[in-house]
Image: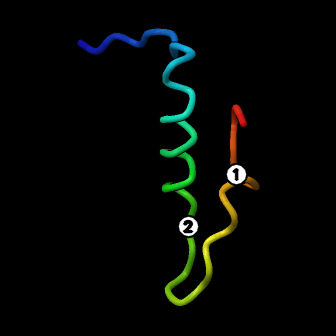
Amino acid sequence: MSKIRDLMPSEYDQLDDFLYEAVFTAPGELRPPRDKITLFG
């Protein structure tokens, strides 16, 4: 069984990294700027 815990403030930057990596871009497309995709920035 898995447990879900609250996100610690020290982990916010890592969550932003995961979110950015999850953005789909088609082959050959430029990725959007990181500052446009953030939860906690």
Q: What's the residue type where badge 1 is placed?
A: Ile
Instruction: Identify the residue at image location x=49%, y=56%.
Output: 21
Is 39 located above or below residue 22 in the figure? above
Instruction: Identify the residue at image location x=66%, y=57%.
Output: 34
Q: Residue 35, percent across and down?
A: 73, 53
Q: Residue 3, percent across and down?
A: 34, 10
Instruction: Name the residue that disc number 2 marks.
Output: 24
Q: What's the residue type where badge 2 is placed?
A: Phe
Pick out the residue farthest to the bottom: 28
Sequence-earlier tag: 1 or 2: 2
Q: Residues within 10 Å of mark 2 (few under 14, many from 20)?
A: few
Residue 36 falls in image quadrant: bottom right
> In which quadrant will I find the C terminus?
top right
Q: Residue 16, percent across and down?
A: 57, 40
Instruction: Identify the residue at image location x=51%, y=45%.
Output: 17
Instruction: Name the residue that disc number 1 marks.
Output: 37
Mark on residue 18? Answer: none
Is 23 located above or below residue 16 in the figure? below
Nearer to us: label 1 or label 2: 1
Q: Residue 40, percent across and down?
A: 70, 31
Instruction: Identify the residue at image location x=49%, y=24%.
Output: 11
Q: Secondary structure at mark 2?
A: loop
Viewer-nearest residue: 22 or 37: 37
Viewer-nearest residue: 22 or 35: 35
C-alpha separation, residue under disc 1 versus residue under disc 2: 12 Å
Residue 9 falls in image quadrant: top right
Task: Please report contact status of discs 1 and 2: CB closer than 8 Å, yes or no.
Answer: no
Coloring basis for residues? rainbow
